[in-house]
Image (cartoon, rainbow, N blue to C red):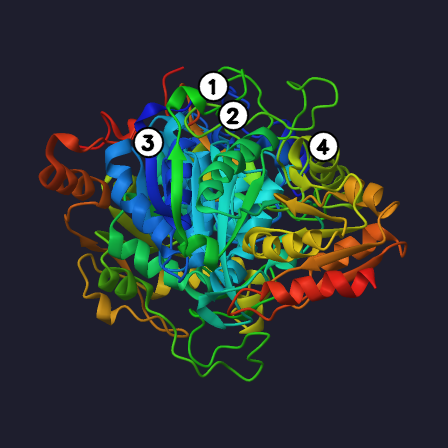
Amino acid sequence: MNADPRGVLTGSHFLDGDHAAAEGALAAGANFSAGYPITPSTEVVERLAGRFPFTGGTFIQMEDELAASIAIQGAVWGGSKALTVTSGPGFSLMMEHLGYGIMTETPFVLVDVQRGGPSTGLPTMPAQADMMQARWGSHGDYEIIALAPSSPQECFDLMIRAFNLSEKYRTPVLLMMDECVGHMLERVVIPSPDKIQIEPRRYTKKGPGEQYWPYSLEECNDGDLVPPLTKVGEGHFPHITGLTHDERGYPAMNAKSQAVLLGRLVDKIRKNADDIITIEEDGTDNADVVVVSYGITARVCQPAIAKARAEGRKVGFLRLVTVWPFPEKRIRELAGRVSAFVVPEMNLGQIVREVERCSQGRPKVRGVTHAGGAVHDPEEIYNAIREVMG
Amino acid sequence: MSESYEATVTDPVSAPMTCDSNPVEDWLRMDRMPHIWCPGCGIGTSVNCFTRAIEESSLDRKNIAIVSGIGCTGRVAGYLLLDSFHTTHGRALPFATGLKLASPKTKVVVYSGDGDLFAIGGNHFIHAARRNLDMTVLCVNNFNYGMTGGQVAPTTPEFAIASTTPYGSVERPFNLPYLAQSCGAVYVARWTVYHVKQLQRSIREALEKPGFTFIEMVAPCPTLFVRRNRLGDGLAALESYEENAVIKNGADTRECDLGMGGPIVCGKFVDIDRPSYLSNQVAHLRKVLGDRYVMPDAWQGVVE
Amino acid sequence: MVETKKSVAPKAPKGHVVVNTERCKGCGFCAQFCPTGVLAMSKGFNLKGYHPPIVADAAKCSGCDLCGMYCPDFAIYGVKNGRKPGGGDL
């Protein structure tokens, strides 16, 4: 399906990542957002608040992030496409409803423009320290989809992809920006609506009064683990709960129901990992060392890689566009033939643990940490490359 | 009088049977019965008043959504055969806010308990009332947290016993009608579940009134609050409501505090008109943006 | 008891109640608040061990359904004779 032209601001723009993300949401067909101000993410909802009255959308500023992150889910069940946007402290509050969205299989996009933490931390300065919170922030077991843009253009592009994935897999999707990407101004090209592919919401084909169960796979093809949605007012009378439930949506609190439900919630992501995962690689084919990075740090790596290559070193580069689910398969393949991974990230070691896990002790894995507040000095990354190459 | 109930079951009355189903069953998910509520709990009684009120109202069943939080009253959503949402603890109101904004044709009813709406959800309540978004909030006030074992709530009367105030609570409880009125609710009433007819009428009025409407429904928690405070059982509690109720429509809500054994002022206290969020939004954006304003599709023909 | 029955026997009752005894949890609301005193609580038990209501004086039933409104367990309702439950025409 092509994008609804009402939301698409076709043209070449000079935008920061926050504004580009807002345009991405509009292009994806988002027509509802609830938010709560928090630096450095607020520009996203400010732009939506200004733009929605011209595109048939609604923005409401809620009383806190708890409210914002559940108001969007009410809106989704009311038939909207919805997002909310926050940063560190608000991201912590929203974990409650990330879990609710996963459990109830409510599609929406949650944007975290990362800043330094914990607690109030560094409101106006960058970090990439919420990456594990993105993976494990809600209590309970689940799989999550998280994308990490490296540029304002990608804030636009990946916002659309985030919405598409959320609809396809009927699940919340995280867009893990950082303060640098959010506040960096660059050229952003917004294509014409017919060039933007939108994953339409899959609604049940059942008519009013027909028995519809919100978690039944009756209308799915073999192997498809994503039940179709409904919305209010259709006469389906669904019951939606955050309790462990059966196909009917009714609370079913026992070990078997838990195993069946969580098994499907996890499998619908794991079994489609190849479809969900996007990575970018450069020079990994014959690399000796591969630098693995994401977000703004993936760009900060480039001078270091260029310098090492200029010295004749075989340095490959792998950028995680999809961070979760983690591209285990590819990292394992590379682990079998490279001598080391270098993992620069703006935290004290998060994604590096995943690389270590997938490496299973074969190549060396060297993190290049940074506590946040500024990007790495590329020289540190260069030094790490040199160090692992001996 | 027969002492064997079998005899009365097979032949309850001499008159001809005209039906074999309870009218409330039409509104219930019968595949979920029996419910979890204790003997003598007042929540089921409030549900009867609610279903009879919607039956009597002009509302189309398809266009009613019920949103609950967590707790004993939070289970109401799961038992009603409507579009029903059992949300997280305290967050029924913000969920309902998003739902209403996305689907204004839907009558959104928030049905939840005192702990859910006024402790963990207190902040959401004051803001929802302030916004005056069209929705009806039905609060079962049983003066404690039932589901988790009878802990002190923001409504527990001063000096009453709860599991976390074993020697009596020393906090001053909320006076819910006063709170709701202060925050901007356009309709505020309080009834006990003894007052079934008045409660039914009041729920209907609240459902049919635009804006943020609120009803406090005082109900017994016979297993915890009533038992711990040596007030007898559910029936004794209802008898005490009958005895202590002072019906005073239009009462000053500042004088509606509830204490142990004191009067229970009941009635319709507030019924005013104030532009609702949706109509205000549309009127204002039309004024400011003129023809450039694009109303959301779902609002067309619903919000004026 | 016998006397009461006799005194009202000539008149057909205006309504009747239907009890689902197995759904009853014996709270006693229906019997206590029946405005005409139709109901009493049985000394017998249902399968769950609760005392359900019994119709002590059927002739007095007006079919007002107040018992149905009070019943927190949806276990009883009253019907006006010749009317549908909830009040509609048959």
Location of mark 1 (residue): A1
Measure how far apart labels 4 and 2 are at the Cα level.
17 Å
Mark 3 neighbour density, 10 Å: few (under 14) some (14–19) many (20 or more): few
The one of B10 and A196 positioned closer to us in this rendering? A196
Labelled pair 2, 1 in contact (Cβ < 8 Å):
yes
Q: Are marks 2 and 3 on the same chain?
A: yes
Instruction: Report helix, strand or loop for mark 3.
Output: strand
Q: Which residue appears at 26% of the width and 65% of the height?
A: B178
3 or 4: tag closer to the N-terminus: 3
Labelled pair 4, 1 in contact (Cβ < 8 Å):
no
Mark 1 neighbour density, 10 Å: few (under 14) some (14–19) many (20 or more): few
Location of mark 3 (residue): A11
Subunit of label 4: A
Q: Are marks 3 and 1 on the same chain?
A: yes
Q: Point out which mark residue A274 bears.
A: 4
The one of A76 and C33 positioned closer to us in this rendering? A76
